[in-house]
Image (spheres, rainbow, N blue to C red):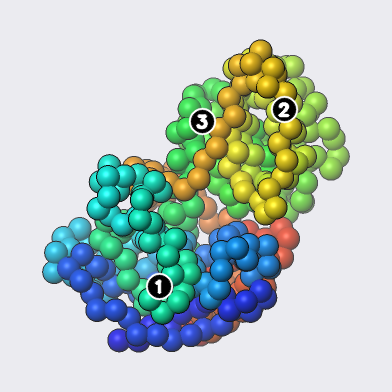
Amino acid sequence: MKQRFGCLVHKGLAEVRERELPALDEHDVLLKPLACNICTSDYTQWMGQREHQGYPMAGGHELSGVVVAVGSAVSTVKPGDFVAPMPPSGCGSCEACRVGKMMECTNRQDTHPTADGYVSGWFGFADLTVRRDYQIYRMNDQLDPSDAAFMEPLSTVVHGMKKLRIRPYETVVVIGGGTMGLLNALTARTYNCRVIVSEGMQNKLETAAQLGLETVDFTKCDPVQTVKDLTQGKGADAVIVCVGNKAANAQALKMVKELDGRVLFFAAAHPAPPLEIDSNELHYRKLELLGTYGGDMTDWEDAAMLLNTGRVVVSKLVEPEKFGLNHIQEAFAAASVPGKFRVSVLCQED
């Protein structure tokens, strides 16, 4: 059985290729992807900013689809189920995987090229793809496939929220109103927090406002002082940095409250932006600087629940223009335009 899939050949070029699918083993699930969204890590490599990831890159890890066939030992899903899979990062059998911490796997599959030479071989931009049974989560079939594809990025947000330990009635500032910034903001709101989004692009500010979020336009004011004014001089209990730049890092340290504040660094950037802070300031302010990356199995489950029950609604975070698989190059070009939310590839359409 052949698989048609999109891959990055080199900077600025994505194309559709074909390869033989491996035979299903007993724990494999054959999926027909319906939608695969273009993640920041995908389109920034298309732009040449993450070439350390290598080529050819058969990426695509934000997807949803329908089960076509299952291996003999699979009992969790059946053909016809609408599902969202996680990336095949964990081996599934090491000590970390056995306790659900796939990102700490000692034999992560995504760190090795496939036998035919593809890096990050997730093959999400494809008409058919294979995942292991433990990576599959059933989704509410009333969800749009492009929305259900948010299960993976939402799981990374959930993972960060757990590290941040936000509590009801706290004030949380999110710096950056892009897709992942607003996804963080929407998730923080499920904790009954006051959420403020700091952003400078008009379309992102408008979308945040449409979602019922408080906004600060940093092109028209000092965002640090505005946050202080909005919190009666106290500052935020927690700040989530969802853009990778030096200014955002510096603002976060000033926006957070004087004592016992927490700052979560959610975004990555290449090259890495500097973070400048005096260790005595950390000491006397009792600051917590937290990092987060990826998600574990419990985060995947929680993300699926949030989407399936409508507690987090992501429809405004998907661009209205969608692209068929044969137009993968145009899709990457659209995703790389500043200010865009998620661009979705409809894998069963030309």
Amino acid at pointer 2: Ile
Q: Quadrant of the N terminus?
A: bottom left
Q: Mark 1 against mark 3, which lies toward the viewer?
A: 1
Tell me the element at label 2.
loop
State the CA–CA distance, disc 3 to disc 2: 20 Å
State the CA–CA distance, disc 1 to disc 2: 42 Å
Q: Mark 3 against mark 2, which lies toward the viewer?
A: 2
Residue 211, percent across and down? 60, 45
Residue drawn at x 84%, y 43% is 219
Residue holding disc 2: 277
Nearest to N terminus: mark 3 or mark 2:
3
| Depicted 8 relative to depicted 200: above or below | below
Amino acid at pointer 3: Leu
Residue drawn at x 47%, y 66% is 120
Q: Nearer the viewer, residue 110 or 126?
A: 110
Amino acid at pointer 1: Thr
State the CA–CA distance, disc 1 to disc 3: 36 Å
Tell me the element at label 1.
loop
Residue holding disc 1: 114
